[in-house]
Structures are given as structure tokens and as C-alpha cells.
Image (cartoon, helix red, strand yellow):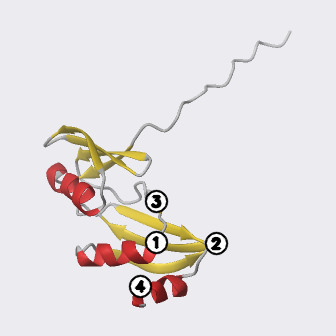
């Protein structure tokens, strides 16, 4: 007689993406003041949690590691986001570039964590022209 099979595990919605940052207060300031994140929890110097778009990011004190998560957020006007990041002196890791169906921009937070923004329905050349115009 075959053994009964166990039902697969069912997980709920993604709760939080945790990023390691060397300075929680500096990271909190960047995400709040530069990217418009809403602080949810603060326990400096060890932890903070912010809501950015529809995602919660946990900012945990520690050294960022290579190959960590790379959250990407959809935006309505990538040219405006690019201009905003440049005005704030945010390092652009990979400038406007075409991806299937759209354009992406990759940048880093003060701790070196990589984030991206994506806009679908246009090319990198079109996005750059919007910013220039």
C-alpha cells in the first residue's frame, strides 16, 4: 500500500525583503527622504522597516553581501526618477537600458545594495529623450 502523501506547504504573501546596511539611520534617511519610503518600525541602530511601493524592506545592521537581493520597482516616469536620483547624488550602477518590453535603471543605496526601477512600454532612447525635453 502506498504511503499517504503530505499536502504541500502553502505560504502566504511575501512579508519583507531584508537588506543588510552598515548604518541603519543613514539607510532609513535615504529610503525615506530620497525614495519616499514610509517608515513602519524603527529600532536603531539595529533595525528599521519601511514600505516602498507595495513592498516592505527591512534594513538590518550588517555588511551588505555580494549577490544579495535586487528589488526592482515599476514606475510611471523613469526619466523623472532618473533626474531625481541624479539631483540627490545617488550612484547610478547601470543607466537607462532596454529590457524586454521596457527600460530599466539600476542604482545603489548608501550601503551598496542594488535596486532598480522599470518602466514598460518605452525604450531607453525614448526615456532619455523625455528627460532631455
Q: Nearer the viewer, residue 127 or 10?
A: 127
Q: Which numbered mark, 3 or 4, is in the foreground of this view? A: 4
Q: Residues within 10 Å of mark 3 (few under 14, many from 20)?
A: some
Mark 3 highlights which residue? 73
Residue in the picture at 61% in, 27% down:
10
Residues at marks 1 and 2 touching, judged by CB atoms closer than 8 Å? no
Q: Residue 112 in the image: x percent, y percent?
A: 28, 64
Q: Earlier in the sequence, mark 2 or mark 3?
A: 3
- Marks 2 and 4 sit apart, C-alpha to C-alpha, by 19 Å
SS for tag 4? helix
Mark 1, Cα crowd under 10 Å, few <14 / some 14-19 / many 20+, is some
**Quarter containing the C terminus:** bottom left
Q: CA distance from mark 4 to mark 1?
A: 10 Å
Check the image and report above or below for 19 versus 5.
Answer: below
Residue 69 position within the rendered picture, expressed as x and y whole percent measured from the top left? 42, 54
Q: Position of residue 21 (x, y in %)?
A: 24, 53
Q: Quadrant of the rendered structure where residue 116 is?
A: bottom left
* Left or right, 56 with reference to 62: right
Q: Return the mark for residue 101.
A: 2
Left or right: where does residue 12 sit relative to residue 59?
A: right
Q: Which residue is mark 1?
A: 77
Residue at the disc numbered 4: 131
Amino acid at each position: 500500500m502506498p504511503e499517504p502523501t503530505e499536502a504541500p506547504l502553502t505560504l502566504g504573501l511575501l512579508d519583507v525583503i531584508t537588506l543588510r546596511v552598515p548604518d541603519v539611520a543613514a539607510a532609513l534617511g535615504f529610503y525615506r527622504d530620497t525614495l519616499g519610503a514610509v517608515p513602519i518600525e524603527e529600532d536603531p541602530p539595529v533595525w528599521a522597516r519601511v514600505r516602498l511601493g507595495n513592498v516592505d524592506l527591512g534594513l538590518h545592521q550588517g555588511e551588505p553581501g555580494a549577490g544579495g537581493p535586487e528589488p526592482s520597482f515599476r514606475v510611471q516616469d523613469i526619466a523623472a526618477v532618473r533626474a531625481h536620483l541624479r539631483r540627490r547624488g545617488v550612484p547610478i550602477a547601470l543607466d537607462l537600458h532596454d529590457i524586454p518590453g521596457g527600460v530599466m535603471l539600476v542604482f545603489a543605496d548608501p550601503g551598496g545594495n542594488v535596486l532598480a526601477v522599470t518602466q514598460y512600454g518605452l525604450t531607453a532612447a525614448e526615456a532619455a529623450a523625455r528627460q532631455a525635453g
